[in-house]
Image (tube, helix red, strand yellow):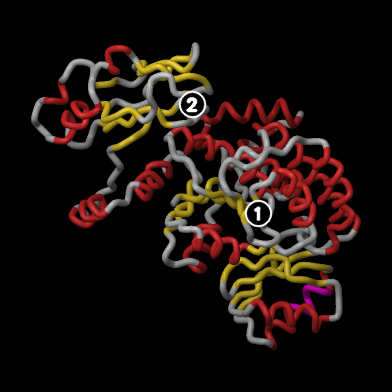
Amino acid sequence: MLAFTFPGQGSQRAGMGHAWMDHPSWELVAEADDVSGRDVTALLLDAPMDELTRTANAQLSTFVMSLIVLDAVERLGLLPGACAGHSLGEYTALVASGALSLADGTRLVIERGDAMQVAADRQPGTMAALLGITDDDAEAACRRAEAEVWVANFNAPGQVVVAGSVEGVAIATERAKELGARKVLPLPVAGAFHTQLMVPARARLRQSLAEVTFHAPEVPVVANVDNRVHTGREEWPDLLSAQLCSPVRWRQSLETLSGRGTTVVAELGPGGVLTGLVRRTTPDVRGVSVATPADLDKLMDMVAGTDEWTASAEAHQGEHLYTSERVIVSPAPGVFEPDVQLAALETTALAEATAAPGSGAGAEPGSALMVGDRVGTVGLTDVRTPFDGILVRWLAVRGERVVEGQPVAWIRTKGSSW
């Protein structure tokens, strides 16, 4: 099973949008500009790091960047079996699951970022990562500090983040060293996120949560607060409110995904920190970071990692292999009607046409596709292939009602056996 995860604040990078400007998914930025009333385009392309580090800018830019990557992945026909997001990333996960619209998600992220910025300005705080320490010892270090400091993130085995007042974090990190922490890494933030110092932001966020519409997630979403799957729309406002002042239970969330049968975790968005946490927490689960268009093939390779593909990869060590199969997805919701000529080709014949390399069957009329060829319609919208290839089989039948992004046809691309 494939799961999507989404990064939180701190993953943003200056100029992180440049790699995506020529990709069709970049069109989401214009929508984000309109909904937010802010220049998201400038944040993704031109903002220096000191501007991106401000909480409000960091959250909005990371959220939109992750949605661009999500849209690009969905265009490949890949859909998750579950989603989760680290802190801010939980909002992206809810958009990915259909629980929130892009517009409502954007509004909530803006309100959340602004509210947290105000709370941090009123009562400055900081955060620090503790390496080589158990969860229990990290909590004990905070208690022994006898100051405003708490565990904010359970990220991975031996990696815990504490947050609180500057004085409290300084004392707690010294106590952590006494309890065996191997290393302390101060984090470049000016707020004590996921602690009681964020209480002033909670009332403002709750008001915003009450003003948007939640839907039941179409795929399971694992919550930060309790590392459990929540499928009811009525649960999420309380979970997101609680998340603001509660620790992110990320290690436990990854274990939940693994326990539900997840075999590949794709981190969609800037950075790659969450992928490293997958390796540390659930070594039997493969993690892949998708931050640029070049990473899309890497994800497809991993998802298509069958025994046959693995054997082929081992036989061609040193080569960069790309998967030969792609799916064509519906560009809109509606009733699917395949192209008349293509529909005349039986699924069996299409499969045989690509099963025997060099057989010549691939030249069968109507089976070869070029980029831009129409394979059918959904309502009044044409469904066109973004790849050259040969149609292998239909994934939707005539008259089937499909949703936007749903795979409707499977093709084998050039560069494989044909």
Q: Which residue is mark 1?
A: 10
Q: Amino acid at mark 2?
A: Val
- Give the distance between the C-alpha atoms of the residues marked 2 and 1, in whole angstroms: 37 Å
Q: Earlier in the sequence, mark 2 or mark 1?
A: 1
Q: Is residue 159 above or below residue 271?
A: below
User: Splitting the image into 4 quarters, where does residue 391 fall?
Assistant: top left
Viewer can see residue 130: yes
Local secondary structure at mark 1: loop
Q: Which residue is mark 2?
A: 402
Residue 169 sits inside the magenta stretch: yes
The residue carrying pointer 1 sits among few (fewer than 14), some (14 to 19) or many (20 or more) residues within 10 Å by Cα, namely some
| Residue 342 pos. (x, y %) | 28, 17
Which of 167 and 30 lies nearest the eye of the viewer? 30
Q: Which residues are magenta?
A: 168-172
Horizontal side, residue 168 vs residue 20: left or right = right
Residue at 83% of width from left, 40% of height from top? 210
| Residue 170 pos. (x, y %) | 78, 76
| Residue 186 pos. (x, y %) | 69, 68
Q: Is residue 391 above or below residue 163?
A: above
Find the residue positioned furthest to the front: 399
Residue at 85% of width from left, 52% of height from top? 202
Query: Where's the C terminus, which quadrant?
Result: top left
Which of 95 and 335 lies nearest the eye of the viewer? 335
